[in-house]
Every structure is written in structure tokens, then in C-alpha cells.
Image (cartoon, helix red, strand yellow):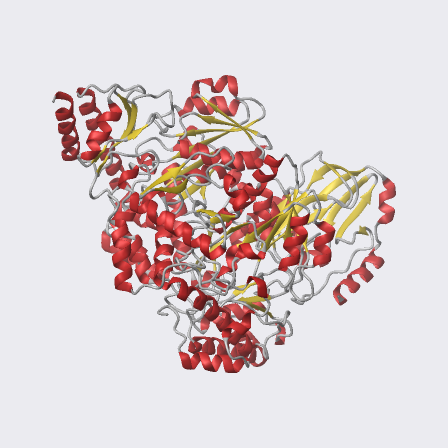
Amino acid sequence: MQNCRSTGEVTESMANPDDRKYTKQHEWCKVEGNTVTVGVTDYAQKALTDIVFVELPKLGTKVEREKPMCVLESVKNVSDIFAPVSGEVVEVNTELLSTPELVNKEPFGRGWIAKIKLADEKELHALMDSKQYDAFVEEEERK
Amino acid sequence: MNLSEPLVIRHFTGLSRLNFGVDNGFYPLGSCTMKYNPKVCEEMARLEGFSLLHPLQPLQSVQGALRLMYELEKMLCEICGFARFSLQPAAGAHGELTGMMIVQAYFKKKGESRTKVLVPDLAHGTNPASVSMCGFEAVEVKSDSSGNTDLEDLRAKMDENVAGIMITNPNTLGLFDQNIADVCRIVHEKGGLVYGDGANMNALLGICKPKDLGIDVMHLNLHKTFSTPHGGGGPGSGPVGVVEKLVQFLPLPLVEKNGDKYAFEFGGENSIGKMRSFYGNFGVMVKAFTYLRAIGSDGLKQVAENAVLNANYLLSRLRKHYHLPFDRVCMHEFVLSDKGFPNNVTTNDIAKRLLDYGFHPPMVYFPLIVKGAIMIEPTETESKETLDRFADAMVKIKEEAAENPELVKTSPHSMPVRRLDAVKAARQPDLRWKE
Amino acid sequence: MRFTPCNERDREEMLKALGIKAASELFVDIPKDVLLEKQLSITKALGEMQLRREIESIAALNKSAKQLSMFLGGGCYNHFIPATVPAILGRSEFYTAYTPYQAEISQGMLQAIYEWQTYICLLTGMDLANASMYDGASATAEAMIMAKNSSGRKKVLVAKGLNPEYKAVVGTYAKANGLQLKEIEVDELQNEIGEETACFIVQQPNFFGCIEKLHEIEKKVHERGSLLVVAVAEALSLAFLPKLAEANVDIVAADVQSFGNSMNFGGPSAGVVACRQQFMRQLPGRLVGKTVDASGKEGFVLTLQAREQHIRRERASSNICSNQALCALASTVYLATVGEKGLKDIAKENHENAEYLASKLEKAGFEFPFGKNFFNEFVVKRKDAKELQQKLLSKGIVFGLSLEERFPELKDCVLVAATEMNDREDIDKLAEQLGVLLWS
């Protein structure tokens, strides 16, 4: 996630589930076999404010790790979402087209964005687990 | 839908009363130069000898129109130091696009394929968008801690692949870039061009000429600097001026004078082409021409001096109360922020509360490098009394934020509508009336 | 200085508050070597009376449509403007306002633009329309870029009958965007259109006044997955011809000068882009949407702003910032004043006047190289056309636009127009003068 600026509003935070991995750009990914489900974290959705539109990646697109994969729009902001791993987009969450607010309401659940067929399993090692991500967010907030 | 005339007039008069212009009150919208628009300019533009001219009439029947364009161009050249101006672009952003196309054409003729253009992090959003529309990659250049262009960053990014830089000076912090000479030198040394965004020209009228600063191509906003009204978002006019070596690339036609006759010059194989049908927003040119003749050379410098004096005075009234991220002598505008405001009251809240005090809010959340930015441009057409009243309101709002934050957070309270749900508007777009 | 209210005493106080002696001290950051020592060489200030005299004397060097009988179109039309239009445009709450960023204090302009978007949709039959653009020509160029962005294709076909002003602007934008542009006759479309063609741009009625068969064009365009962009230079034709949406047009780019905007020597007027729903997010320029306020009351805001340059910066759908709000307002007031039936009547009157003009010209021996399937302008040909134009001008009649300069193959051809302002009396006078010139 890039370009997001925190609004400074204080709302309760969701815990970052420990069944998945995290990136420094505040995306999460959950591995099932060789498919990875991708979404943004609670921290990210708060910084992005109310999502009004999700520009989903096209099915079959080859995405590259840390390269823009899709775009989230809020009223006054546009943010790139980066692919946490390289691979092919095999499924997208079309529910977001009509209800983009799911990204805000259930970032770790129904607000998922896309599923990627993993090209190189080793890329997963570079990602953070939930504890490391907790610490990373704490550090970010101190800045 | 067949309405009687009284209904039509009441409907639109009613709508006008829900609107706010410079004639209604203080409009310190930073980077927009909302100065008073003299009434005589409006009347002159409505003269039948101007408003009822067809653009394709025989030239002998429009000599006055061509003379006005010719003389306006001459005045703009004198003010900026450029060789020629094209009056064709219809707005500032349109001028930027024209300028970028000129840059593109210049390198194409030289046989160089430069792919990037540098854009400071302080730039207006139109700058990088104009760059992209010409197929260039926009590369951001940082500002340093004093609010000038970061020369180290510039040196690192400026090379033979870079066509040039788009710079706004005074910049969007309202500060004169103290590094301007070095910026231009560094860019020129690598063969690049310097584009000047003339949005803030009001501060420099009669003080210095952009060309002398090292700028090669620049647009002006007749609807900011030269006092033509903004019309609620247009029509504007964004003439583009260039140094001698770029004249061949200007959009056509230009007006030429032969003896005592004026004519359009359509030739020139290197021109980028046309940017707009016919000759530009002629009606706006009439207003700017009238304004320039009204204030004259003596008045121009006073405009800049009063604009800068007003801004610095207002800043002196507010600096104790609001966070000032770059503390320097400002030019025609300055940028504060909501940092340290009590009870999480934000810039947006401050802006909305100002409406209750009868003021149009400043520009907010711009430039992007200042979090919660409040950009204030009083212009030269405001009195000290108005500035004092505005400063009092700003100070009062800070007190309210401490004592009664809800009052500020739920403002405005005196407008025809409360805060509008922009999220709903974007999620479920309703863009036209439907039965 | 009459526009700066700062008096000597205030000035002194302000300088004192800043601890300086003169305002010139505030320019410390400007390099000394560029500070101007002399005043600019521009004339001195003029008092209002003198100023008026001077500007009026410049205007008097022109001959306006009040003094000349104008049979001239080609992208700008001499239409009648009802008094309601200047009355509302003169409200300074509208004309001295900025773009309606602060919605709560700009509901008037926002609602007016929403009404304008509605009118454009009703007139074209399209799903959406933006808040206006610079003019018809640049709107057509923006429509082309929309087509490129939504199709990912890089070739563009342009009909020869597109207004040369529009063609030139489209060409400029195409060159800068790296698009390949080709001009074709409409009947070459089948052979020229391919899988790489982003769009075909055609004008309705075309520059020569002819009404294009959009239904046939549309099929050929869509067969190849390309988009149909229709440019409209004479907006009044929208009230005369079938709705553009009925011909499956994808994007409409129009100039609405005809609706309540003076000719102004070609500008300002307003352009607009209207499109089908599926292109909503590629649509450039401002959009106004209806929403509710914190108490549930209806209101209007600028919306879908994430498409635009101030948010998306280098990835915006266009660099366009302002619209032509006041010109769009003029059109909105115009349309509200004349109403649906009134507009159709005006369009019909235009067509009838043009037909009457055509019949007179035919009698005077003019040929019709493009036939007579027109709305309110058409091309006529006669060997001595140029000479006649000159002679008529000396009688105070502007007899159309000679086409030879722009289209060398159209030697001796003139594009003439008749609006509701060219009534029978006007046309009879022209015919009479022609008669005198031809038979004397």
C-alpha cells in the first residue's frame, strides 16, 4: 500500500491474525497449498479511510512481487496495492465491485482482494509473521 | 420541461444565493489568487464589438480583436521577459500541457529521446498529470528543510535522460525558492529545459522577470494574476510564454502586425499544432487586457508588493497560534498546519468552521508534504480590516477547539447544508436527475 | 490604486507590525541581480472613463454580427440569447466564485452543474456527462484519450468530415500521446478499421453540414471491438436529429456554444464529454454527484475525484483541472428558458431557414456538391464564389466560409449556415444582392 496518510482518528484496532504473513506495505497473504489470498491489513484500511472503489486486477494477470497489482480509491486518495508474491491472478473478489466497504469492515475476511497462484515458494520467507508485523506497525506509529 | 421565465429566474437566483464569490467576502484560497474582479472588465468583454464576433469572419472586419491580442501578448512578454506568448490555452492546466508538448517537440527536433521530467514534491497535481499526458515519466524531486528545491536530490536525478523540470516559484509553500539560480543551472547544464508554473506570478509582477530567473517556458493564469473572474471553475485562460529558441514550437496561429494591419500567422512546420479551436478564450483576454491597461506599469508592482505585504502581515497575526512548518518571510501566500491543535480538531474542521464566520476557507491539505496543510493567500485586494477579522476568527476557532471541540467538529452550522457525505456520493454515484 | 484598499495608515501599521520600513524588504529571497530597477515598459494606469474610451475604440475597429449579416458557421454559430442568460450570468455569486471544492458554500454552482449534466444526458441519450471542458475540439481529443485508455489500442481513425479545428487539436493531442492517427472517408471505414483501432471519430452533422449515417458506421466500428466517438460542433442539432445513444455511440464530445454563449471570437464556450455507463471511471474532468448531508438533507458534491489530477497525479485520466462552469451555466439557463419544445422549435426554424437559403442559392445557380441532407449549414459551389463573397462583404453580408484554403480539392466551394437569426428577410436581402451582382 502506498500513499496512505493516517487521518489521526482513533478507533479500536483489530488484531492481526497469526494464520498469515505480512508485508511492509501493509498487505497480508494467506497461503493454502500453492495459492495465496491477498488483502490489506486493518492498519492499512484505517489509513486509507473509506474505500469507495476497488480496481481489481484482471484474471490471469502475471503479477510481480512488490509491484503494483491493483488500486484502492477513497474519496481523496488513490493507493496502489502491491503483490506480496509473484504469480498469476487466479481469482478476484468481485463482491468488492458493489461493496468496496468490505475492505474497511472486514479487511481480514470478506474484504480479501485476489488470489495468486504462487510462482516461487521461497518468496514467502521474506514476509513477516503476525508478531513481526505487530512490532513493525508499532514502529510506524511512533514515527 | 417548459418553464416560465419568472420560474427560471427565481430558480437560478435561488441557486446563486447558495453560492459564494469574491464579491461576497474574503476568499483566501491559496494558490488560486482570488482577487477582486473589476467590473469595468466585465463590461468591456460584453461589448458587441468583441462578444458578437465570429472567429471565421474576414480579417478586415476583426482588426480590433487582433490588435487587442497583439498588444496583450506584447504586455505579457514585457512582464515575463519572454520572446513570444501563445494566447491559445484555455486554462492553466491546458497551458502546462502546451508547455510540455513544446518541451517534447524541442527534443524531438534535436533528435534526442529524453524520457523523464522532474517534478518537485510541492507541485500542483496538474504538473505530473501534464507530464504523463506527453508520455514522459514524472520523477519527483524533494524539497529541503528550508522549503527550497533539494539540490543534492536534483543533481542525483538530473541527467541526459531528463527533458527538464516543472517548477513553481514562488512555490506552493508561498516561498521564493532560494535555489532557483542553481536549479536552472543544473538543469541547463545537462541540456534540459526549465518549465515555470505561473500560478504564483502575482508575487513577482514588476519585481522580476521569470526569464531572468532562468525559466524557458511558462504559463500564466489570466484568471489569477490578471484578475479575470474564475467563473465558478472557468472559463480561464493560460497563455504560454517561451524564450527565443522555443518560439518555433508555439501553437498557431500567432498574431502578426504588418504596417498598420494585423493578421494571423498559420505557418511554421515545427509548431506543436493547435490546442484549442480558433484562438483561445478571447473573452477572457479582453478582461485581462482591460485590467492591465487600468493598473498600468505603476500599478503592477504595487499589486505584487501589496499581495506580499498582506500575506506577511496575516502570517504575523497567526504565527503564534498555528503551526508554521517553514518559518521564513513568505511571498503572496503561506502554509500553516493543524499540528498540535487541541482535541484532534483537524484542518477540515477548521475550514468548515470558517464558513460560519463568513469566510471562504483557505486551500486545505495541499501541498502534500505538509500534513494537514492550510494554505492562505489573501491577495492585494483585501484591506487590513478584513485581514484582522479573518485572523481573529482563526484564533477564535483555536479557542473553540480547546473549549468546545464538538462545535468545530460538527460545523458548519450556518450553511444551507451540513457536511455532505462524500463517501456515499462516490460509492453510489448519482450524476444526473432521473425520473 | 483603485483595486487595492490598503491606505497609507494601514500600510504603516502593517509595516510596523513586521518591523520593516518598506514592502520591498519582503523580497529578500530574490537574487539581487534579477530585481528590476526600472518600471516595466507598459503604459501608465488609466482612469475608468479614459479606459472605457480606449477599449471601446478598439472594439469599434471590429464589425460585429449586429452590423454584418452573418451566414457563417463551421463550429461557431450566431444564435439568439434570451435575456435570462446574461441576467443570471451577471450574478457575482456565480462568476466570482472558484471551483466548488467547499461544497457547503457552493451548493448553487454544484446543483447547476448537476442540472447541466442532466440536460446533456437528455439531449444525447447518453448515461453520463461531465461538468464541461474547454471546448468541443479539446473534448474530442479527451474522448480519443478515453478510448485509448479503455481499449489499450493505439490507432485512431478520423473522418475527413471532422471540423478542421477539431482535427488539428485531436492531431496535437495524438502526437503527444504517441497515437497513430489516420484520416479517412467514411466509406473507407470497413477497410481501414482493425483490431488495433481504439476509436473512430466522426462529426454529426459533419463539417460540410451533412448528416452521417451513424447506424451503419456503428456496426462497422463495433464489429472490430473499436469505439465510436461522435463530435458535435452544432449542439442545436441534438434537438433535431435522433438521439445519439440510439446509434450505439460510445462517447460524445460536443461544444455547446450554441446554447446561450456568445460567439466571443471563438471563445470561451464550453465543451462536454458524455458517455455510456461503462466508461464512467475513464471520463475526464469534474463530475457533480448528489448525496446527503449529516442531517440527511439532499446536497451536491464534486465526486469520483480519485480519477482526477489533484489526487491521481501522473496517473490521472487527464490533466484537466477546471471546467468551463460559467459557460455551462449559461447553457443550463438557456435550456431551462427555452424548454424542450422551444428548443425543438428553434432547431426546426434553423433547418427551415437553411432550406430557404438553399432554395434561393439554387435559383442563383449554385451547385450542392455534398447534396442537401443537412441541418443548418451546407456547402455550395460556383465558379465565381470567391468574387461574390468579396462583393457581398462590401454590402455588409458575410457569405459563408471559403473552403479552398482548408480543402484544396474543394475549389470554389463555400460553407454557408443559417440560424434563427437569419430570417427570411435577411435571406431575401442576400438573394437580392446576389441577383444584382449576377445579372448586372
Closer to us: C104 or B212: B212
- On the question of residue C77 being in view, the answer is yes
Q: Is residue A25 left or right of residue B241?
A: right
x, y percentage for residue B300?
43, 64
x, y percentage for residue B81?
50, 54
From what the image shows, is residue B208 above or below residue B85?
Answer: below
* Residue at 21% over, 34% down: C393
Closer to us: B379 or C158: B379
* Residue at 57% over, 57% down: B213
Say which quadrant the N terminus of chain B sits in: top left
From what the image shows, is residue C188 above or below residue B319?
Answer: above
Say which quadrant the C terminus of chain B sits in: top left
Image quarter of residue C8: bottom left
x, y percentage for residue B138?
64, 47
From what the image shows, is residue C111 above or below residue C363?
Answer: below
Closer to us: B241 or C34: C34
- On the question of residue C328 being in view, the answer is no
In this rendering, the count of numbered labels is 0
Closer to us: C6 or A82: C6
Q: Is residue C133 left or right of residue B186?
A: left
x, y percentage for residue C291?
47, 55
